[in-house]
Image (cartoon, coloured by chain):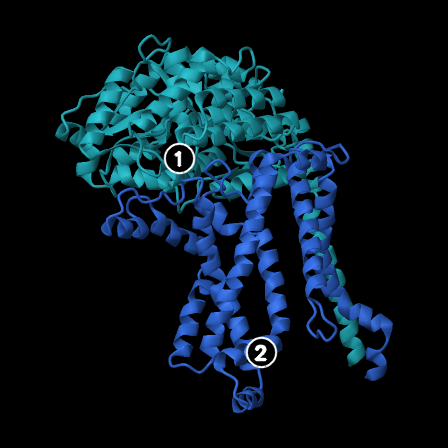
Chain colours: A cyan, B blue
Amino acid sequence: MKKKSFISLAALSTAAVFTLAACGGNDSEEASAGAGNNDNGEAAQEDVTIDFMHLWPQGSSPDHHRIVEDIISDFEEMHPHVTVELEVLENEQYKNKLQVVSSSNQLPDVGMTWPAGFLEPYVNGELFAPLDDVLEEDNMRDDFVAGTLEAYSVDEQAYAMPLELNIAPVFYNEAIFEENGVEVPETYDEFLEVIDTLADNGVTPIALGNRDRWTGSLWYMYLADRIGGSDALNSAIDRSGSFEDERLEEAASRIQEMVDHDAFISGFNGLSDQEAKAEFMNSNAAMYLIGSWDLPNYTTNEEIPQEFRDNIDFFKFPEVDGGEGNIDNWVGGPGVGLFVAENSDVKDESKAFVKHFTEEWGKRSVEDAGVIPGTQVNTDEVDLPDLFIDVLDDLNNASDITLFADVQMSSSVAETHLNMIQSLFGEEITPEEFVERHEEALEEDE
Amino acid sequence: MNQIMSDKRVIALYTLPALLLISVLIYVPLVLTGYYGLMDWDGIGSMTFIGLENYAALITDGMFWSSAYHSLLLALFSVGSLVLYLAVSVVLAGNIKGADLFRKIFLIPMLLSSVAIAQLWMRIYHPTNGVMNRFLASIGIENPPLWLSDTSIVLFAIFIPIIWQYAGFYIIIYYAALKNIPKELVEAARIDGASPLQIAYKIKLPLISGVIKVTIVLAVIGSLKYFDLIYVMTDGGPNGASEVMASYMYKLAFRTNDFGYGSAVGFFLLVLILIVTYLIRKATTSKDDSIQY
């Protein structure tokens, strides 16, 4: 009796080891089947599976999720031999999982990536497939808003299809503006006056959740853009110029000037963006600078009182006197894009899927999910709230889009930048130190 | 039966599953972390061996040392707070009325998850709507502190919920130990004319000294590797003012994609904790110690 249980125990533990080992195994069988399919061309039409990983779970992004489901079933209908296997994760888990599977070279065939700094290590590791052949088909390249594809390109080769595009308008509460007798500012000086009037009347002028740091970075980027033009910041980051530029330093001192004028909500460095947003949504603050991904909150989101939504409008970041920037310049950037894994065994099908997905997504995302796609939207054809149309029109007329700084920079420089932003707003460093520390970090990174 | 159990091969077989699990889940990753620490690796592409360069960088990394200093401060505060927990436990174990109820109240924070505690205290510390600043405003303080955004106080503002979070845990340990002291001893002391304070100091404390040593080690280790509340409440900010070693390690590995360096920090943290544990043991062991840790 006893002996028997020892044997079964031994068997059990050995089995456990094999199970663990199996987890790490590769799908080599599937790989060879896929390759065979490619050789035989369309005629054979062996059944293939595309593994697709995205980050819009049904619970938190129901609209996104539904569109994805529709697009997939369309695609499966058009290509009966293809099945799309889904794996859906929340944002942070998604990032972590992508990193983990990439280190063992087991990326899904198709997945989502962020531009520039996020994408680069994957491209350098030759994990993403170049998509230029797809972009050449039907001149697809021309469908994208200028500047979006570039954000996913390394050495002029595009590695992902942009799905989202965001710009950052200054949203404001018309009711509060009216009550305090202030008008939309067009220059920085007028802007300061608005801030002073609001602050004197006991109204918080600007909701800012700078614990998240990129929120404060938006303010800095706009000032840098309006003072130095889009070229000042970009050339400092791509190292054709220096960050120790007096225009960039002036932008930093303007930030501190705004802080001194009590422009931002008290305790902003300890507040998250969500908390700051809540202040704006409760009409406790007059202005809020955020990406256009927040537009549904001010237009279509039924959970937010109609009265509040009607009160919200946006303005373009004001021009600075003597500055080189253009008021039609936006700070913004693409959100996620679709990549195809370099070692995918169903590359052709995956590329076709990515193309189909991007096109369909472009047609439906604004109307159905309130997401501005990377492809151009014809505003005459869509049925949308005015605020949306205004943003889309401004986007089509944009003179240039300056990519979010923390996206443009490599991740270690971005970390320095974001920390410096907190210190700058907290007035713990001088504008001079601010640019010096950036220059040091950029130099070190080269 | 005994014959089977004393067979070395059988013993090995019995311990095998547990050994396998603990190796796969703990020791293998541990060795791997040490190995990654010698590499220049972004977590995605290929690794390059750079020897001890990561550790050399670590020694001159101001951010790391300031986070290490914060961790050390937390350890000191945690150990200091043990005195408070001990005092509370002595009172609770002294058969006062409602001791049971109080014990449960002190235990509540332990039942909450760290993230819930973090959310709760973020509400309390909210600069304008928070309970704390509302209260301060109501008693006439005009510019109440901005708890989580002022670099000079943010660290201490976070220590309070951390210490509060673990109060129940240590109080339960002390309470159980105190309840285990034989009544006869306390009674004998009382008959000999010892005051309650003397009983606490001279009878009870020495009797639970083993438990106290364990709690000191737990508090120090727990503090040095502390992560949760800081990650949720401030993310180490503003500008690193509340960064601790574990949160710094996380940032390096997962935000700045510097897996090699992050691993080096993690391995350093492990070595540091081992050394500190050893030192505490050295400093507190006496011959008749029965509890090993």
Asked whether the residues under the numbered discs 2 and 1 touch, taking CB atoms below 8 Å apart as contact, a structural biologist would say: no
* Image point (39%, 44%), residue name: A60
Q: Is residue B145 above or below residue A343?
A: below
Q: Is residue A443 above or below residue B203?
A: above
> What amino acid does circle 1 point to?
Asn
Residue A227 located left or right of residue B183: left
Q: Position of residue A114 (x, y in %)?
A: 51, 30
The quarter of the picture where the C terminus of chain A appears is top right
Q: Which residue is mark 2?
A: B202
Q: Is residue B96 above or below residue A379?
A: below
Q: Is residue A10 above or below residue A42?
A: below
The quarter of the picture where the N terminus of chain A appears is bottom right
* Image point (31%, 10%), residue name: A321
Q: CA distance from mark 2 to mark 1?
A: 53 Å
Q: Secondary structure at mark 2?
A: helix
Residue B16 located left or right of residue A166: right
The label nearer to you, 2 versus 1, is: 2
Q: Out of A301 and A411, give the one closest to the viewer.
A: A411
Q: Position of residue A157 (x, y in %)?
A: 58, 17
Q: Which residue is mark 1?
A: A210
Q: Out of B60 and A234, give the one closest to the viewer.
A: B60
Work out whether disc 2 and disc 1 sit on a shared chain.
no
